Image (spheres, rainbow, N blue to C red):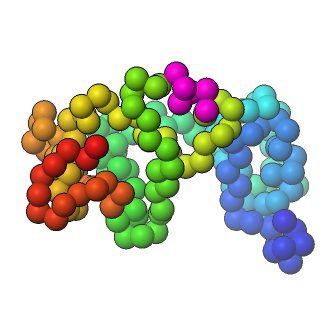
Amino acid sequence: MQDITGRAGVPAVYDSIGKATYETSMACLATYGMFVSFGATTGEAPAVKPSELQHGGSLYFTRPTLANYVGPRADLEHSAGRVFDMILGGHVAVSINQRRPLAEVAAAHIDLEAGTTTGSTILVPEGGGHWLCCSDTLRDTRSSRDRHCFRDFPCGAGAWRNPT
């Protein structure tokens, strides 16, 4: 990474692997860089010494948990709204590459564990579930609350219908 960035490093590293990639990830950071540890596939990252952050270029290390960012309902709604705005604005792509009936949940888990899936996997309840789709809006038939619609659903413009 140092060669690619002209030895400047990157402003942030998001590491979901942990122990096996910790040193390499830290070495990628620019001065004032942020190391975000959010997983431990190969074990937890080692304990971070304050002097390591200092000598690495006044680095920052964090281990966030989603629960702290969406604990209050208002924070959850704000964060979800920003994500949907980014999706609808074309800044984030959603890849739904697998769909299975809910009855095949065990097979879906086997595929996920085997690493044979990419993107998102959607489990569809028997009978299509409770979501109806109309152009750019999803409506939960249980509460009549409108939601944004992913363009992926086979909606008919202006016509409410079951997406399955």
Above or below: residue 143 compared with residue 104: below
Magenta residues span: 106-111
Secondary structure that dominates the magenta span: helix
At which x and y percent is residue 13?
Answer: 71, 55
At which x and y percent is residue 120?
Answer: 50, 45
At which x and y percent is residue 72?
Answer: 32, 36
Is any part of residue 42 visible from this angle? yes
Q: Residue at x 81, y 52 (%)?
A: 25
Q: Residue at x 42, y 70 (%)?
A: 90
At which x and y percent is residue 80?
Answer: 35, 49
Q: Nearer the viewer, residue 106 or 63?
A: 106
Q: Nearer the viewer, residue 37 or 90?
A: 90
Q: Is residue 108 magenta?
A: yes
Rendered image quadrant of residue 86 = bottom left
Q: Residue 24 vs residue 43: left or right?
A: right
Q: Residue at x 79, y 31 (%)?
A: 42
